[in-house]
Amino acid sequence: MGENGALVHARDLVKQFGDFAAVRGIDVEVRRGEAFGFLGPNGAGKSSTMRMVACVSPRTGGDLRVLGMDPERDGPRIRARLGVVPQQDNLDSELTVRQNLHVYGRFFGLSKAHVRAKATELLDFAQLTDRAEDEVEPLSGGMKRRLTIARSLINDPELLLLDEPTTGLDPQARHLLWDRLFRLKQNGVTLIITTHYMDEAEQLCDRLVVMDGGRIVAEGSPSELIGRYSTREVLELRFPPGEPAPEADLDGLCDRLEVLPDRLLLYTADGEAVLAAAHARGVRPVSSLVRRSTLEDVFLHLTGRTLVD
Amino acid sequence: MTTDVTTPASTGRVLGPVRASLIFVEALWTWYRRNWRATVVSSVVQPVLFLLALGFGLGSQVRPTEATGGLEYVVYLAPALLVATAAQIGAFESTYPVLSSFKWQQTYLAIAATPVSPGQILAGHLTWIGVRLGGSGAVYLLVAAVLGVLTGPGVLVTLLVAVLTGLAVAAPITAYAATIESEGQQFNAIFRFVVMPMTLFAGAFFPIEQLPAWIRPVAWITPVWHGTELGRGVVFGGLEWLPALGHLAFLLALFAAGAALATRNYRRRLSA
């Protein structure tokens, strides 16, 4: 492998489209067997980074090694060992579910017999066996997504790249997908996931980087990041629309205060205590909520913006 | 964190360029086996209808003259229809199917993530069109043979000429289609202002000597004219070596230029 066994090794990686710098010099190291996340809002440079790692987009600058090889020179050899789940499903909707797997596997130089056996195994994994002979077009979004993931596994990839794997899916479909991705991880597949959902990053990633404006603004495990950039608990206070939030009355009650359009976020070790203290000062919110800090709070702290708006 | 997990090696490997293109053709064949019915009308039924209506119908009113090489009109028309239809199929297969593969279904993007390269995808696409042209042309010839309008086995060489003509049309249109980001309204202009006039006026239905002298040079730069001249020449004779080589060279050059441009555009779009 590359430097100290990393599957992906990037130093000062840059991607430029004309005048626009999508990725502005990032350092990334993905180790074998881990689930690594790129968390950030739309336009942060996550997908551009993924496309460079997937060897379908040449880097503009910096150094990049994937599976110990240089994408510029060994693109096809690297791609042979990768699995890619793109942001937008690109299945052949006029073929059957099974045919999509057969056809795709052949591009990896796999024999027909091998592809047939593997497809049956993957259909089972993706819980699509009873839809195997159906055309793809009428399948639900969640089923298409599972088929795309199954297809990405046809060559037993050592590294699986998932770009926004659950965007646009309903909660049930998301949980089913997460469960499948967990299993892959347990089987030793290294995962790289981009997402703008903090719950997804917390669920799936051992380690992640927070990206904003083409740069990495923080790096660590979800709990490390929360410990470093946020407090244990968050108190959310909502006030009637149109009424100015009483920020001044809350002075000194919490470690940090964030003002969002529809609510105030009070960062503190003990949410209930702060709520009681606010009450004592005569603050009367419409509703209040004490919750644990999430990566959303980390992101808000680092960039001053929310992830999903 | 798990650093000492052993991942089994991937089973994927890199295909040679020829093999990669053939696997692409195999994939389209899988699609075609399910969807061939939709293509029969434009590929086979339409030229046969033209042969019946214009060849037999209108042709019954046309006296064999020097312009038709002294042949019955339907006999004169049969090989040219093969070539003109190939041009139409070549054009169609290079428009919406290409745009869809880049933009709507994005199947090209899926394949670009495999070891197969953009150039190999293009080679597969053009090979597939060649296979399609050969297949539907052969079916058309069978029907024409049953109708008794073929003069001999020389028409098999015309089939090769038709395939080349179709590819000479397909390659540059593919290059153009690979650059389109919109919904493909531009294709209608290609069909209306290039493909249709070329089919009607570039020597397939009547010799271009019947056109006003000033417009003949326009016919000379159409692949259909070169294709029909060559395609008729090889069955009916009367074509000198030098003009024959000229026609062949024109078609090959158009194909080569289109393919080179398309290779560049496929690379740009799939590896940006």
Image (cartoon, helix red, strand yellow):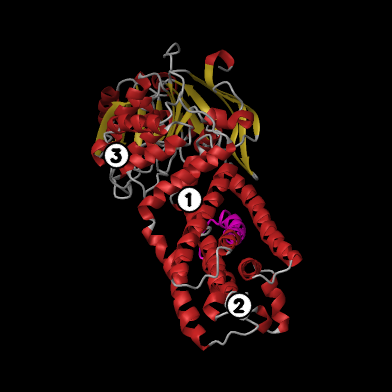
Tell me the residue that label 2 is attached to: B201
| B65 shown above or below A181 | below
Badge 3: chain ID: A
Q: Disc 2 to disc 3, how far (Cα)? A: 75 Å
Looking at the rendered image, the quarter that the N terminus of chain B falls into is: top left
Q: Residues within 10 Å of mark 2 (few under 14, many from 20)?
A: many
> In this rendering, which labeled residue sits more in front, label 2 or label 1?
2
> What residue is drawn where x is 56% and y is 64%?
B155
Residue interval drawn in magenta = B163-185
Q: Earlier in the sequence, mark 2 or mark 1?
A: 1
> What residue is drawn where x is 57% and y is 87%?
B63
Name the residue type under label 1: Ser
> What residue is drawn where x is 48% and y is 59%?
B96
| A27 shown above or below B184 | above
Badge 1: chain ID: B
Is B272 positioned to the left or the right of A283 in the image? right
